[in-house]
Image (cartoon, rainbow, N blue to C red):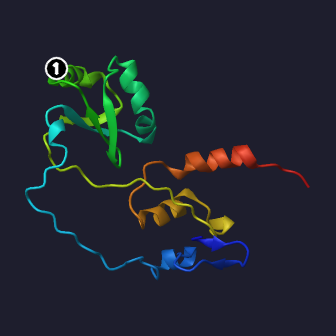
Amino acid sequence: MRGFDRRFGTIAPGANSYAGTVSGLHQGLEQVKVVEVSDFVRAFDEFHNLAIVGRLKDLWSLRKIGVSVIEEGFRDVNIKYTCGLDVLLVFKSSFEVDAFCANALEFSWFQNLEIWIGQLVAFERIAWLKIHGVPLHLADNEVFDSIGRRFGRYFMHLSCIWKTLISRSTTWGF
């Protein structure tokens, strides 16, 4: 178990405390292992010109991409999550790719689209940060955002989650 161990009131081995993260004591830097790949490796050649790489606008669009594509009338498309907010839409024919691209301006859920011919796709990962131990008087979006930025950029602002948690679980009584 990583993080705060409730049984003993301590930080689990290998985890970062709030104070350690904010002060910069725990950078989480480990030795990086490198694998060299031949220039001749070409993955998914069969999808070249039959697929579209699309970057979605937000997490909500990523979550609903399957339904959105079907609602637009493209039922025979295979959707593959690549990374971050990117997906690969694989079609059966180049005719379907062209039809999708012709209607692309109507799709408000994409930031950009391009036909995939094997080009490099950005490498990103989506992760949730669970932050424990922030004193109540510091439990502000600015503090949480600054903690989150130490690990990368954020997609969803914390205030949405914070308001949801308070409205669902708060019981006031004495």
- Badge 1 local density, few (<14 within 10 Å), some, or many (20+)? few
Kind of residue indicated by mark 1 = Phe
Q: Estimate the x, y position of residue 34 in percent, counting from the top left.
A: 23, 72
Toward which corner of the image does residue 3 lie, by quadrant?
bottom right
**Residue that mark 1 sits on:** 95
Q: Which image quarter holds the N terminus?
A: bottom right
The image quarter containing residue 133 is: bottom right
Q: Is residue 62 above or below residue 98?
A: below
Report the number of numbered marks: 1
Query: Does residue 110 show up?
Result: yes
Query: Above or below — where is 110 with respect to 141?
Result: above
Q: Residue furthest left?
A: 40
Classify mark 1: helix, strand or loop.
helix
User: Who is closer to the viewer here, 13 or 27?
Assistant: 13
Q: Quadrant of residue 2?
A: bottom right
Percent position of residue 104, x then y: 25, 25
- In the figure, 154 relative to 71: above or below? below
Residue in view at x 46 percent, y 79 percent: 26
Residue 163 position in % (x across, y down): 63, 46
Residue at x 74% of width, y 48% of height: 169
- Toward the viewer: 115 or 22? 115
Q: State the quadrant of the C terminus.
A: bottom right
In the rendered image, residue 93, in percent from the top left (x then y), is placed at: 18, 24
Q: Residue furthest right?
A: 174
Left or right: 36 with respect to 139? left
Question: Which residue is at the far bottom?
Answer: 25
Side of 124 where 94 appears, left or right: left
Decide which of 140, 12 is in the foreground and name it.
Answer: 12
| Residue 116 visible at all | no
Residue at (43, 42) in percent of width and height = 59
